[in-house]
Image: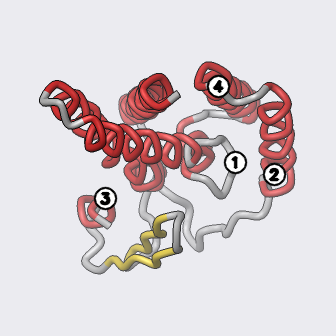
């Protein structure tokens, strides 16, 4: 909702989905490709500010001898990281897919970026301790889901303003930063809890 407000939406609302979070809805149609990418990324982007705070708080609690509080904070950091990095999966309906569709200049670049992002997600899952069979199934499901949903998007009434080269690079950098923060949070939490 904050991302919608930052991009000029006067009204925004949230639909909450139990155990999964929520979906923010803007008060007007999107104006530009940058706006679509920015709003999509900020779901996980704003959470990227919370994960380092939870990691630091867990370390502080552990240093003070509060082992249970440290484990609880590590669990929160791990769950936040896992849910948000899962939302970066390069499937059209997920935020990662929305961002990639806006910043990639053509179908070949989109396919390559999607493959690299999905490979990075699966590699993180392997490093965090997920079984290879689970990761293969997850990769196959996400790939099939991506192929099924790639043409099912709602088309805007008016052509969106194109994204500028600098904005494209800024959003790509932000996507990598959010991915890195949540990836580190997931790996750190799995090391603390396993």
Quickly name the residue at label 1: 91
Quickly name the residue at label 4: 129
Counting residues from the N terminus, which is met first, the one under dot 2 or under dot 1?
1
Q: Position of residue 173 (x, y in %)?
A: 40, 26
**Nearer the camera: disc 4 or disc 1:** 4
| Callout 4 crowding tier (Cα within 10 Å): few <14, some 14–19, many ≥20 | few
- Residue at point 41%, 43% (across, down): 75
Vertical position of residue 171 compared to residue 31: above or below: above
Pointers 3 and 4 in contact (CB under 8 A)?
no
Q: Which mark is residue 76?
A: none
The residues tagged by marks 4 and 1 sit, at their Cα atoms, a distance apart of 23 Å
Vertical position of residue 20 compared to residue 190: above or below: below
The residues tagged by marks 2 and 3 sit, at their Cα atoms, a distance apart of 27 Å
Counting residues from the N terminus, which is met first, the one under dot 3 or under dot 4?
3
**Nearer the camera: disc 2 or disc 3:** 2
Counting residues from the N terminus, which is met first, the one under dot 2 or under dot 4?
4
The residues tagged by marks 2 and 1 sit, at their Cα atoms, a distance apart of 7 Å
Q: Which mark is residue 145?
A: 2
Q: Secondary structure at mark 1?
A: loop
The residues tagged by marks 1 and 3 sit, at their Cα atoms, a distance apart of 21 Å
Q: Secondary structure at mark 4?
A: loop
Picture quadrant where residue 163 is located: top left
Q: Secondary structure at mark 3?
A: helix
Q: Position of residue 120 (x, y in %)?
A: 63, 23
**Nearer the camera: disc 2 or disc 4:** 4
The residues tagged by marks 2 and 4 sit, at their Cα atoms, a distance apart of 24 Å
Q: Position of residue 39 (x, y in %)?
A: 40, 55
- Residue at point 20%, 37% (across, down): 66
Pointers 2 and 1 in contact (CB under 8 A)?
yes
**Nearer the camera: disc 3 or disc 4:** 4
Quickly name the residue at label 3: 3
Counting residues from the N terminus, which is met first, the one under dot 2 or under dot 3?
3
């Amino acid at each position: 909702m904050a991302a919608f407000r930052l991009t000029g939406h006067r009204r925004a609302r949230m639909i909450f989905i139990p155990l999964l979070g929520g979906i923010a809805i803007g008060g007007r149609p999107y104006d530009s490709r940058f706006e679509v990418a920015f709003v999509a990324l900020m779901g996980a982007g704003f959470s990227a500010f919370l994960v380092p705070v939870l990691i630091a708080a867990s370390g502080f609690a552990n240093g003070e001898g509060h082992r249970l509080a440290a484990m609880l904070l590590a669990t929160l950091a791990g769950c936040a990281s896992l849910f948000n990095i899962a939302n970066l999966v390069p499937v059209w309906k997920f935020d990662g897919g929305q961002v990639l569709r806006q910043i990639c200049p053509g179908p070949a670049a989109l396919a390559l970026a999607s493959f690299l992002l999905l490979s990075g997600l699966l590699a993180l899952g392997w490093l965090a301790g997920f079984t290879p069979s689970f990761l293969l199934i997850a990769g196959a499901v996400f790939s099939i889901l991506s192929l099924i949903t790639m043409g099912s998007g709602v088309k805007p009434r008016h052509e969106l303003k194109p994204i500028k080269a600098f904005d494209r690079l800024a959003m790509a950098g932000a996507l990598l930063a959010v991915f890195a923060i949540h990836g580190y949070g997931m790996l750190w939490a799995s090391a603390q809890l396993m």
